[in-house]
Image (cartoon, helix red, strand yellow):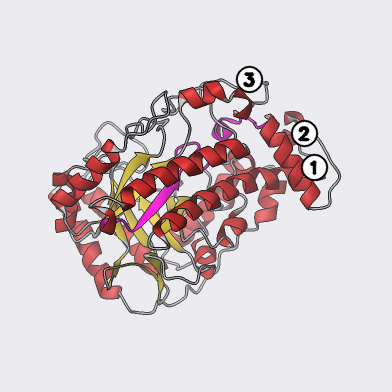
């Protein structure tokens, strides 16, 4: 645990934002490309921070302009313009860029041996869900890790020299599937990684633990389970641990770059550790890369973790708010949690999922429920506005303003610990064969029911 007081950190059991000699609620409004008017609106609602999409190289979801061109030249103009636009509308805003690291098409073409290799031996495929590239660097590639760290460092060193540098309070380092550090393909039951960097890292991982050399278990072994649905193949269980540690190590490396460049002045965090609920359950739990939360919690380079609110029961009438993270464990390790509310409001009229509700009153109730959860858990709050229009309604704006007011009233008040503990046994998640329906009832729905009945967990 870091001894320094990060800008986003814990005080009296609550996550706070520290800057310019004052303490504020750690509330942020987020959207991919905010302009001055958007930032001004949320500042007027009492939200001190703004989170926005960016990249240190090229964004595989197209949410930010590329920094690197095919010749390796860097252009930070889009990042500069976004920071200045936010401050033009909200001069006192705290900036929290959401910086994706990936690779350019040119880098992939020049480093084919460093790319992920899928179970069919291919290095190229469609990943779906808006991912624009057909190749991806292996998270085990030390060459790619150096490339990603250098790109992030170059962007942040540039930012430190700009007129907006004093407004920066931290960085959300993003990568992988949906920017949330899942191994690409895991939610579609596609298994990787058979690349040379992965094999070398696996050999080194085993050697460091005094284990005999062993090949990467083949897909059939990784998927196999006995009649009791427990995995008893020790190499498979070890590999799933290794697979997740590779992700946690990349996150730690990049958060270390943030601390290095800022000399500890910025907080560093990531979307990671979704042990209560994975994006697609089942195979994604084992193969997604989030089963090394203990490693992330022990890493002093990581100040905070973030997660969207649960996707299991988001509806307005019988839903409940909960995190995909085991928030008490994160807090016990001295780290902060930014709870991302991305529940779709009634303003998104063409989206019937992800908690969408039909009426303003229902959407307002959902916003209030998310804010109440954050207050009870002592978390930070990220109002995520995917389209820039989620909250375009006076009723919804009023809910956000009231949440901001309540957050300020709670500053300095010690938070009482929850009376109920909900335990997650991480080793079992690597060993059990958790198929979708069973897993959805095993953890998230149980927790959602406790939340719905008013139990503090």
Estimate how packed mark 2 is, as few (under 14), some (14 to 19) or many (20 or more) residues with alpha carbons within 10 Å: few
User: Which residue is pictured at 35% across the width and 40% down the height?
Assistant: 54
Q: Looking at the image, which is closer to me, 352 or 15?
A: 15
- Point out residue 367 in the picture as x, y percentages from the top left corner: 28, 54
Of circles 2 and 1, the one toward us is: 1
Q: Dots 2 and 1: beta carbons under 8 Å?
A: yes
Q: Position of residue 161 (x, y in %)?
A: 30, 51
At a point 54% along the width and 50% down the height, the residue shown is: 253
Drawn side of residue 354 relative to residue 293, left or right: left
Question: Mark 3, mark 1: which one is toward the viewer?
Answer: 3
Q: Is residue 384 left or right of residue 402?
A: right
Secondary structure at numbered mark 2: helix
Cβ–Cβ below 8 Å for labels 3 and 1? Answer: no
Looking at the image, residue 33 lies above or below residue 271: above
Query: For residue 456, which quarter of the picture?
Result: bottom left
Q: Say which residue label 3 marks.
A: 122
State the residue position of label 2.
221
Instruction: Tell which circle, 3 or 2, labels the residue nearer the N-terminal end.
Output: 3
Q: Is residue 173 magenta?
A: yes
Picture coordinates of residue 295, whole percent (x, y): 61, 57
In terms of image quadrants, where is residue 389?
top left
- Label 3 and label 1: CA atoms lie apart by 23 Å
The alpha-carbon separation of the residues under discs 3 and 2 comes to 19 Å
Q: Which residue is mark 1?
A: 235
Label 3 neighbour load within 10 Å: few <14, some 14-19, many 20+: some
In terms of sequence position, does the residue under pointer 3 or pointer 1 come before the other?
A: 3
Q: Residue at x 48, y 65 (%)?
A: 335
Which label was assigned to residue 417? Answer: none
Question: Is residue 316 in view from this perspective?
Answer: no
For the record, the magenta segment spans 167-193
Residue at coordinates 44% horizontally, 40% vertically from top-left? Answer: 151
């Amino acid at each position: 645990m870091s001894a320094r007081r990060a800008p986003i950190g814990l005080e009296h059991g609550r996550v706070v934002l520290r800057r310019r000699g004052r303490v504020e609620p750690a509330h942020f409004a987020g959207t991919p490309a905010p302009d001055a008017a958007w930032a001004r609106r949320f500042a007027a609602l009492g939200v001190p921070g703004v989170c926005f999409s960016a990249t240190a190289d090229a964004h595989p979801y197209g949410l930010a302009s590329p920094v690197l061109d095919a010749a390796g030249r860097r252009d930070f103009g889009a990042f500069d313009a976004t920071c200045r636009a936010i401050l033009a509308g909200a001069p006192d805003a705290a900036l929290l860029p959401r910086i994706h690291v990936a690779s350019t098409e040119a880098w992939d073409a020049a480093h084919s041996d460093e790319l992920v290799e899928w179970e069919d031996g291919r290095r190229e495929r469609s990943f779906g869900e808006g991912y624009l590239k057909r190749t991806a660097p292996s998270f085990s590639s030390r060459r790619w890790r150096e490339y990603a760290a250098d790109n992030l460092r170059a962007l942040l060193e540039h930012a430190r020299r700009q007129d907006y540098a004093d407004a920066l309070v931290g960085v959300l380092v993003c990568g992988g599937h949906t920017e949330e550090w899942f191994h690409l393909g895991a939610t579609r039951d596609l298994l990787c990684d058979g690349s040379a960097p992965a094999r070398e890292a696996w050999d080194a991982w085993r050697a460091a633990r005094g284990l005999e050399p062993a090949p990467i278990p083949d897909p059939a072994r990784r998927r196999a389970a006995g009649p009791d649905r427990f995995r008893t193949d020790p190499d498979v269980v070890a590999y799933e641990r290794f697979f997740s540690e590779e992700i946690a190590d990349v996150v730690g490396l990049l958060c270390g770059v943030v601390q290095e460049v800022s000399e500890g002045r910025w907080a560093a965090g990531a979307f990671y550790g979704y042990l209560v609920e994975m994006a697609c359950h089942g195979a994604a739990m084992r193969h997604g890369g989030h089963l090394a939360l203990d490693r992330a919690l022990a890493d002093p380079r990581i100040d905070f973790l973030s997660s969207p609110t649960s996707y299991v029961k988001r509806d307005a009438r019988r839903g409940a708010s909960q995190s995909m993270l085991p928030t008490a464990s994160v807090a016990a390790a001295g780290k902060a949690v930014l709870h991302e509310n991305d529940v779709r409001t009634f303003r998104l009229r063409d989206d019937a999922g992800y908690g969408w509700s039909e009426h303003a009153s229902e959407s307002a109730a959902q916003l209030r429920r998310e804010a109440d959860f954050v207050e009870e858990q002592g978390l930070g709050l990220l109002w995520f506005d995917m389209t820039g229009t989620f909250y375009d309604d006076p009723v919804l704006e009023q809910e956000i303003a009231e949440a901001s007011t309540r957050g300020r009233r709670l500053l300095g008040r010690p938070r009482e610990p929850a009376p109920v503990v909900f335990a997650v046994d991480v080793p079992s998640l690597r060993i059990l064969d958790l198929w979708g329906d069973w897993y959805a009832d095993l953890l998230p729905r149980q927790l959602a029911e406790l939340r719905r009945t008013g139990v503090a967990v």
